[in-house]
Image: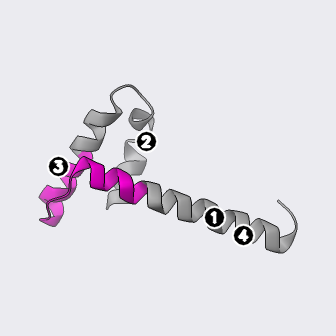
Amino acid sequence: MLVRLWAENFDYLESKDARKVCERIARELSAKCGTKKTSDKCQKKMKHWIDRYKAAKDWNRNQSGGN
């Protein structure tokens, strides 16, 4: 659900209102999942997933020797 909300709001996350958007994502996630997520936790989790994706992508590129 976090990834879906992040993708839906991606354009706004690149704007000056990114902090407000992250807070809205955290509130919506908390409401739908019944958890207490903060905007900082959501940002850290997405950064972790993005970093892991980039690492896997780089590893795959090095294994195949191409783009």
Q: Residues within 10 Å of mark 3 (few under 14, many from 20)?
A: some
Magenta residue span: 25-46
Q: CA distance from mark 2 to mark 4?
A: 26 Å
Which mark is drawn over residue 59? Answer: 4
The residue to which callout 3 is attached is 27
Left or right of residue 51: residue 17 = left
Left or right of residue 19: residue 30 = left
Q: CA distance from mark 3 to mark 4?
A: 35 Å
Residue closer to the observer: 38 or 12 = 38
Residue 57 is situated, as x and y percent measured from the top left of the image, at: 67, 64
Left or right of residue 60: residue 44 = left
Going from N to C along the chain, the mark reached first, 2 or 4, is: 2
Q: CA distance from mark 2 to mark 1?
A: 21 Å
Quarter of the picture containing the C terminus is bottom right
Residue 52 is situated, as x and y percent measured from the top left of the image, at: 55, 65
Residue closer to the observer: 41 or 20 = 41
Residue 31 is situated, as x and y percent measured from the top left of the image, at: 12, 57
Residue 21 is situated, as x and y percent measured from the top left of the image, at: 29, 38
For the stretch drawn in magenta, the main secondary structure is helix
Amino acid type, callout 1: Ala
